Every structure is written in C-alpha cells, then in structure tokens.
Amino acid sequence: MTPTKKGGEKKKGRSAINEVVTREYTINIYKSIHGVGFKKRVLQALKEILKFAMKEMRTPDVRIDTKLSKAVWAKGIRNVPSHPHVQKS
C-alpha cells in the first residue's frame, strides 16, 4: 500500500459558472396556443417558451434571445410554429 498524505488535495466539484451545459429541446406550443385568438397567438407562445425555460433552468431570471423571438414572429402574428426547437444554455 502506498502512504496517503494528510490534508491532501481536495476534489473540486462542478460549478455552473465554470461549465456551461447546452441542451436542445422541442417545445409543444400548440397545446397553449390552441383556442387563443389570432392577435394574441405569438404573445402567448413567447410566454409559454419563457415559462418552459424557467421550469427547466430552475430560475426566474430567463431571457429570450432575439433570434428565437424573430423565429417565432417569422410567419406573422397568427401562424406560430407549433413545435420550435430551442437551445438552452
């Protein structure tokens, strides 16, 4: 057996600050948009994406990137993509 040092080096745990994890999700927005009036569909979709991100990231401080917002608005206020692919980091 090899002798061990007293007061040796500590193992460093993982930190969210040091390591950024990126995950991809497909959100089913259709469930929340179905039955909503045409002029409020995109707004409801963005709220649903925000709520999903808050739930997954476990934090109330969530911001939507402008690229995602433009992708949701791309087909107009009425025709919202029903299953957008979203990256979370």
Image: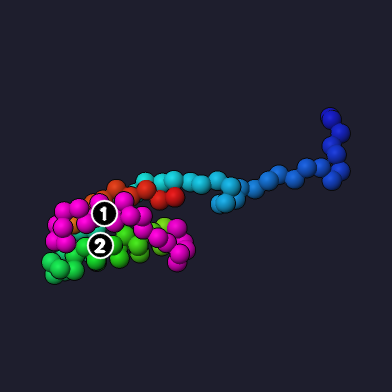
Q: Amino acid at mark 2?
A: Ala
Q: Amino acid at mark 1?
A: Lys
Residue 77 part of the magenta segment:
yes
Magenta span: 57-79
The reply to whether the C-beta atoms of the residues labelled 1 and 2 are less than 8 Å apart is no
Q: Secondary structure at mark 2?
A: helix
Residue 17: which disc? none
Question: Which of 2 and 59 lies nearest the eye of the viewer?
Answer: 59
Instruction: Locate residue 61: give its quadrant.
Output: bottom left
Answer with left or right where residue 60 lies relative to residue 33: right
Asked if residue 38 is positioned above or below residue 69 in the image, the reply reads below
Question: Which of 17 and 69 lies nearest the eye of the viewer?
Answer: 69
Q: Residues within 10 Å of mark 1 (few under 14, many from 20)?
A: few
Q: Residues within 10 Å of mark 2 (few under 14, many from 20)?
A: many
Predominant SS of the magenta segment? loop
Q: Secondary structure at mark 1?
A: helix
Label 1 or label 2, whichever lies nearer to me, is 1
Q: Report which residue position mark 2 lands on.
A: 45
Query: Which residue: 65% across, 48% down?
Result: 13
Question: Residue 27's spot in the image, x, y percent?
Answer: 29, 54
Is residue 71 in view?
A: yes
Answer with left or right where residue 89 lies relative to residue 38: right
Answer with left or right where residue 59 lies relative to residue 66: right
Q: Quadrant of the N terminus?
A: top right
Q: Report which residue position mark 1 lands on.
A: 70
Residue 60 part of the magenta segment:
yes
Query: Which residue: 29% across, 48% down?
Result: 85
Is residue 31 in view?
A: no
Question: Residue 5's spot in the image, x, y percent?
Answer: 85, 39
- Calculate the distance from the C-alpha at mark 1 to the C-alpha at mark 2: 12 Å
